[in-house]
Amino acid sequence: MPSTPFHKILIANRGEIALRIMRSARALGYRSVAVYSTADAGARHVREADQAVCIGEPQPSQSYLCIPAILEAAASAGADAVHPGYGFLAENEDFARACKRAGLVFIGPSAEAIAAMGQKAGAKTLMQAAGVPCIPGYHGDEQSDARFAAEADRIGFPVMIKASAGGGGRGMRLALSAKEFPELLRSARSEAVGAFGKPELILERALVAPRHIEIQVVADRHGHAIHLGERDCSVQRRHQKLIEEAPSPAVDAALRERMGATAVAAAKAIGYEGAGTLEFLLDSEGNYYFMEMNTRLQVEHPVTEAVTGLDLVELQLRVAAGEALPLAQEDVRFDGHAIEVRLCAEDAAQGFMPQSGTMALWRMPPQLRVEEALFPGAEIPPFYDSMIAKLVAHGRTREEARRKLMAGLEEAVALGVSTNQAFLHRCLAHPVFAAGGASTAFIEEHFEELLAPDSATDERVAALAAVLLCEGAAERAGRRMTHTLPISLRFTQDGRTLDASVVPGRTGGFEVHVGELAFGIELLERTQTFVRFACNGLAERAACHRDGALLLLHYRGRQFRLEDRTRVAARKAGDAAGDGKLRASMNGRVVAVMVAVGDIVEAGQPIVTLEAMKMEHVHAAPSSGRVTALHVKAGDQVAASRVVAELALP
């Protein structure tokens, strides 16, 4: 087979995956070219590449999804190869063809292989013909609402609606009944168009609490293909993975061999070249069913690298250059256990709502493998996926890996933008996950437990914050806290209003009263971003960031937002409640307005749908009433807290 040597790689992606690819490329002597939207001008992947080219505004059609702009960037930088990373154009057969026509080596499978497996409907037909077990469903060409409703009735509820193109949980909805099916079908189709530019959908029978198991394969153009074992990706929210591990607690050696052989046979059947993943659902009886093939590198590939000792990006580069795989199936060895969590800029308590803004303080644990691209002061734009880092732990046993990851996750500091850090820690600590029993229903079944408040931690933070806020107020006024009279203050802690008093002691400590509780606080060591303190004699550490009356604290793996409101008149109870105004919960784009002025709506009825970080979020009526005003239309870009609709309440 002909070789296809290259020397400079343009990475058609952003953030942590761009940096990950650069690392392996440099180790092999390749130079790298970054592309970026104007929103990413200050990003790390731009600064650390050998060269960088701006490809337009952050709108997808003008930047990372714009094929002509990327090809022009490659030509201007003299790149002779393109690595698509994951997401964006990684599974776009048109992009692979365009690269080939431009004389660029596409570091991935052929356009034909992407086309064969990129559409879920066609992929299922191919797999069924190859004897691979598939979930019953509908993947026909007729895409009318009436046909889908009839097919859903035939399959039987619950039924899963899926975008035929793409992956990553976009365009997926679980319909439990025929009543909710039409709106979920509309929403899935809208999100599929927004994420992949294609409205086609398929239906599948929804399995009850299965495991999500995927098999990593690598193949070369010389006819060799191997698998690198499985990853368990069952812990998900909104059909998107949060925690992945290798090997799976539910897969033994015999099942691994069967699933691996199936995956390798599927790869060979389509002449696959490069790294790819076959995804399956595994039921409680040990039966597995093909879902889809991801014809690219996966977000969770580091856990496979940890247990095999292989560099998957290096294998991609070698295969793309025309080399044969450097190992056979019998050479693959598995060592220990690895677990990865996806740190996302989102608010778990608010339905995993994406967050954007400035990351004021950012420090990751050195003892873990961390894939990230942030720094203190980095901007997290609202235009892209909410994942901001991956933290990976490897241990001799699953329990050792879990323990290491929990410790590192608690140590990680991300202040300024809400993240799912504490939620991930609680998932890892939950007895069901600890026992290896988590299915795809894990988060839904245990959601309330995973969000349960920790009042003891909240109270200690309130006492520490009272002291730091008092000191901050004194510093702004040019005074020092040297007197022994009580200082009264009012502050908010993550939206909750607290009253406190602080009495400075003669020896440097403080007596703090928060509500009915009393604490002794002593500040032992302080910098601008760190405080070591003792609370009732127990010495601990916290990371901190102060900006005027605003104080951000990272303590015991959690982020706290506190604001001094002492000089602000307390708002009367009910001022903000029941005003009939529906406000945007985040920065985003309006994709649908479901009502008109004059409509009578019920509490919880959908009013406006916003899209942020590639996900749709329905904003519902806070109470029953009549729509008196609509301030947005489809296509508008809105900022968080903007009033989008008004209701006259009964």
Image (cartoon, helix red, strand yellow):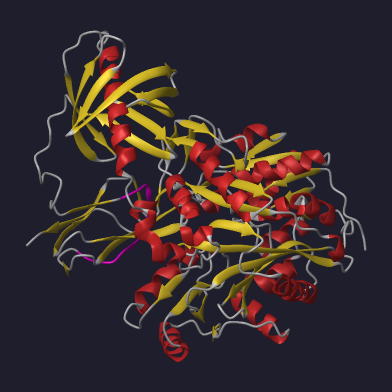
Task: Identify the residue at the far left of this view.
Answer: 650
- Looking at the image, which residue is at 87% across and 59% down? 325
Q: Is residue 592 magenta?
A: yes
Query: How many circles with numbers are drawn on the protein?
Result: 0
Examine the rendering and report whether any part of residue 76 can be seen.
no
Image x and y of residue 354, in percent: 41, 50
The image quarter in which residue 98 lies: bottom right
Examine the rendering and report whether any part of residue 282 can be seen.
yes
Is residue 620 found left or right of 417 in the rendered image? left
Task: Identify the residue at the far bottom of this view.
Answer: 154
- Looking at the image, which residue is at 42% across and 81% down? 158
| Residue 390 sits above or below residue 298 on the image | above
The N terminus - image quarter = bottom right
The image quarter in which residue 279 lies: bottom right
Region in magenta: 585-596
Image x and y of residue 370, in percent: 61, 41
Image x and y of residue 32, in percent: 74, 40
Task: Identify the residue at the far right of this view.
Answer: 1
| Residue 8 sits above or below residue 593 on the image | above
